[in-house]
Amino acid sequence: MTVERHLILQERELPPSAEWQPRTNGWLCLRVAAGQGYWLQSGEAVRSLTAGDVLFMAGNINGAIRASQLGPLKLQFFTVAPQMLTGVVTLTECRQFELARNHPELAALVFTAKDGIGQKFAGLVAVPAEDHLASRCAWLQLWAEAFANRMVEPPEIAQAEDKLRGRFRQLVGQIPQAELAAHSLTDLAAQLHCSERHFSRLFRDEFGTSLRSRQIELRLERARQLLVNANAKIINVAYESGYRHVGLFNSMFKKRFGVTPSEWRRQNLKQTFSAHPRSHRRTVTPILARIALLLLCVSAGMSGWTAVDRSRHTEVRSPQITTCKVAI
């Protein structure tokens, strides 16, 4: 699997009449910077795209973007992978986004240049931004706002199980996936005031898998994120992913992905650099609340810093310490 450039603004230009069929493991969020084109989706009417229009699409959708015959089509885009947002997105929200990928009305959303999303996208690209935390949070917030009040809700709860199952959904809907992976079954059952067996049954009924299987998947996904850093030692990756024995970590990783962590890093880092040779890198409400809090913390932390560049000399003032607690 190729490591994608998550939450990083990129650009692409299509020659006249050319088509592009994007493929990603999550969501592709793009804006027409210049030119005219069309969104072609199987089974749906052709949508015209003009300068400033925005398209949010699932990476598995059967569709293509075509440039007009009149001239080239310049696109600005970024990708979002919900599975890489374990510290922000809850398990319930992750499942909702997965359902949205296969929903005919949510798999592709088009916003005009005059819509709020279109205006915000334009505002973000208009400000020269580097690849830092604040800009990534801004892209993430834009994506979350596009799906606000559009998410697929879980099926209705049977009357007999209203109370307990309702509390269960509330609990898993509030705990970020990274935190869920660190909790034991005993802890979670105690928070719900039920037996471990009952919690396990509720979890399997709701998500179609066992709690332990989901926790293993989350830990290994976390490991893949850490392995993108070529300087990270395998033993440190294992510890930060929740494994205390490197041998067990290597065994579980190879069982899941077919290669050892070291082999996976070599293969995927090589693919990452070769897959984007010409890319230009720019020098639901609960999730929105968490992202807004994260942006607030970033802004507060950065506001204390000033940098003045004078003849290649940089003067830096230390910040006033601002403490914010956000699970990442």
Image (spheres, helix red, strand yellow):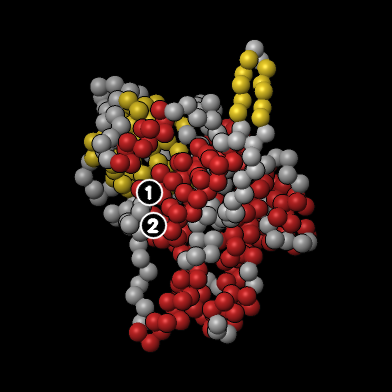
Residues 307 and 197: in front is 307
Residues 178 and 255: in front is 178
Instruction: Say if 148 sits above or below 54 in the image.
Output: below
> Circle 2 — which element?
loop
Can see residue 24?
A: no
N-terminal label among 2 and 1: 1
Query: Where does label 2 land, which residue?
Result: 284
Residue plotted at (36% across, 52% down):
147
Residue plotted at (41% across, 50% down):
144
Residue that sits furthest to the bottom in the current view:
160
Picture coordinates of residue 69, whole percent (x, y): 26, 24
Instruction: Say if 253 sits above or below 115 in the image.
Output: below
Can see residue 114?
A: yes
As measured in the structure, the alpha-carbon distance from the residue carrying label 2 to the one carrying label 1 is 8 Å
Query: Where does label 1 land, which residue?
Result: 145
Name the kind of residue labelled 2 in the image.
Val
Residue that sits furthest to the top in the current view:
311
Q: Is residue 15 left or right of residue 164?
A: left
Instruction: Say if 130 sits above or below 86 in the image.
Output: above
Residue plotted at (28% across, 47% down):
42
Picture coordinates of residue 215, whole percent (x, y): 60, 65
Q: Is residue 287 left or right of residue 178?
A: left
Tags 2 and 1 touching, CB below 8 Å: no
> What crowding class fits label 1: few (fewer than 14 Cα within 10 Å), some (14-19), or many (20 or more)?
some
Name the kind of residue labelled 1 in the image.
Glu
> Circle 1 — which element?
helix
